[in-house]
Image (cartoon, coloured by chain):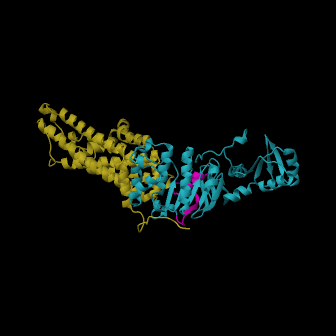
Chain colours: A yellow, B cyan
Amino acid sequence: MTTEILLDAPRGRYRATNVARAELSKIATLRSTAITAGIAVVACLLVTGLVSHAALHHLPGWYQGFDPTQESLTGMITVALAGGVLGAMLVTGEYASGTIRTTLAAAPRRPMLFAVKLAVTAVLTFVFCEVLSFASFYLGQVILSGGHAPHATLASSGAFRAVTMTGLVIALLTLMSFGFGMIFRSTAAAIAAFVGVVFVLPLVIHGISEAAVKYLPTNILTQSVMATVPQAPPGGGDPNMPLAPGVGLGLMVVYAAVAVAVGAVLFARRDA
Amino acid sequence: MITAHSLTKRYGDSTAVDHLTFEVPSGEVTGFLGPNGSGKSTTMRMVMGLDLPDSGSALIGGRRYADLAWPLREVGALLDAKAFHPARTARNHLKWLALANDIPTRRVDEVLEEVGLTSVANRRVGKFSLGMTQRLGIAAAIIGDPAVLLFDEPVNGLDPEGIRWVRHFLRGLAAQGRTVFVSSHLISEMSLTADRLVVIGRGRLIAETSVADFVARSGGGAVRLVTPDGAAFVPAIHTAGGSVEHEDGSLTVSGLTSQQLGDLAAAGGLRIYELTPITASLEDAFMALTQDDVEYRSTTVPETLTVGEDAGR
C-alpha cells in the first residue's frame, strides 16, 4: 500500500512561536478587534478633549488642587471598558464560534496554548494602552495650555509615572477580563463580570465601607494611578486616602493574576 | 492507527462512554456506528484530546493527541461543522491553521482548490451554506496532509450532491492509504464507504468487525420474486427448503439464493419476471444489534425508530 503523504514535517515539534503567529493572524483577521480598538481610540480622545476643554476659563480659585495630568487621562476610562470587552471577547469569541476546538486540534498542549494566548493579549494591549495613554495626555495638555489653564509636561512631578502606569493598569484590567473569559467562556457572562467588578462594585462597596473602595480596580486606576496630586494630606491617617501608586499597581497585578490563574486551571482541566 | 483502551467518560450520573476498547487500523476506512447519544462524538472528542477521559486511554500511533509533534500534519479532524468564526474568511481561517503547525501557506490554496472553495475563499464563513461549511471543515482537516483522519457525521444535513461529494472524497483519502475513522448516522453510507465497523450502543462496544461480517451476522439475505406462476413456484420453493412470504404482487423468498431460484425455474419451466436479491441491509443489521441499546426509544411505534443525528452528550 502506498501512502501519498506529500508534506515533510519539520524537525522537532510545534513551538510557541508557531502558535503565537496563528494567534496574531486570528486577531488580525477579525474586523471586530479593529472596530473595538478604533472605538476605544475615538472615545478616549473625545472624552479627554471634552473634559480638558471644560476645565478652561475658570477663575483662579477653581484650580485649587487641579491635577492637569489626571484631567488629561480621563478618556482612558473608556479604554478600560474597551479593554474589558476585548480581553473577554478574544477568548469567548472562540468558544461561541467553536473555533476553540480547532485551535486545540492545532495546539493541543493546553498550558502552552494558554501562555501564548495570554502573552499575545498582554503585549498587544500593553502597547495599545501605553500609546493611547500618551496620546490622551498630550491632547489634554495641548488643550489646557492653549486655554491658559494649569498644564503639565512629562517632566512635571509624577506625570510620566501617571501616564505609563495608567496604560499598564488598563492592560492589567484587560488581562483580568481575559481571565474572566476563560472562566465563563461566554461573552455575556465575562463582560458582565468585568463591568460588575469595575463599574458596579465601587458603588456597592462605597455604600458598605468608604474606606474599602480604595482597594478596588476602579479606584486604583482613577485615584492612585492617574492622579499626581495627593487628594488628602499624606500621613494624615485618613482611611479614605487612595493607595500609593506602587501599592495600587501591585494590587492590580494580584487581581489580574488571580483571574488569569483560575482561568488557566479551568482551561487545562475542562472539556473543550 | 487509533487505539481506544477501556475508554470511559461520565457526565454526572450518566456514563457516556463505558470501558470502550477498539482499534482503527491504518490504511482503512473504519465506520463508527451507534444510535443517538451512544457516545460516538464523545469518543471522537476524547481521541482528539478535547474531552478528557475519566479513565482509559485513546491513542493515535501509540501517543496521546496532546503529545503529537505536529498535530495537524498527523491527524486531521472534522468533528463539528461549526468550528469557524463566522466573521473570518475561508482563506484566513485556513491561514492561521497553517501557521499554527508551520505548514507552507501554499497549502491553503491547494486545499481550497481540492474542496472546490477557491471562488469563495475570500468570503466570510458566516455566509456559507452548510455544504460549503462542511467542505471548509474537510479542507481544514487535510491541510497538514495527515495520515489519520477523523470525521464525525460528515454528511450530516448535506443534500444528495454534497453527500456524494463527501463520500467520494473520503474514499479518495482512503485510496491514498490514509486511515479514516468516520461516524455517520446514514448507515447505508457505511456500506459504501467503510471497510470495517465499530458499533457502539450506550457507550459500550457492540461489534467490531468487517462490514460484510456484520451484515452476514444479522441474518441472511432474501430474494424478491415476481412470477405469474406462483401457484407452481411456491411448492417448489418449499420443497427446495426455502420459505415464502407473499407481498403485493411479489414473493419474498428466504433460505434460497437467486441462483437456486433460477435453477428451480429452469427445472420447472416457470416464468420469472423479476428476481432481485435483497441483501440484509446494514441498517437492518444495525437495528437488530442495537435495539436493546437505544437510549431514547419510541415505544409506541417501534417501526419508525430512526437512528438520527448524534446528539452528542
How far across and how far down the image is residue B165, in percent?
54, 50
For residue B220, above or below residue A212: below
* Image point (66%, 60%), residue name: B210
Left or right of B190, for residue B123: left
Quarter residue B105 falls in: bottom left
* Front-most of residues B253 and A170: B253
Is B302 in the magenta? no
The answer to whether any part of residue A229 appears in the image is no
Left or right of A150, for residue A237: right
How far across and how far down the image is residue B20, in percent?
63, 58
The answer to whether any part of residue B226 appears in the image is yes
How far across and how far down the image is residue B188, in percent?
64, 50
Left or right of A141, for residue A173: right
What segment carries the magenta color?
Answer: B39-63
Q: Residue furthest left?
A: A148
Figure disc tally: 0
For residue B166, above or below residue B213: above
For residue B98, above or below residue A51: below
* Front-most of residues A214 and B233: B233
Q: Residue furthest front?
A: B269
For the N terminus of chain A, the image quarter is bottom right
* Image point (60%, 55%), residue name: B193
Quarter residue A84 falls in: top left
How far across and how far down the image is residue A17, in percent?
36, 60
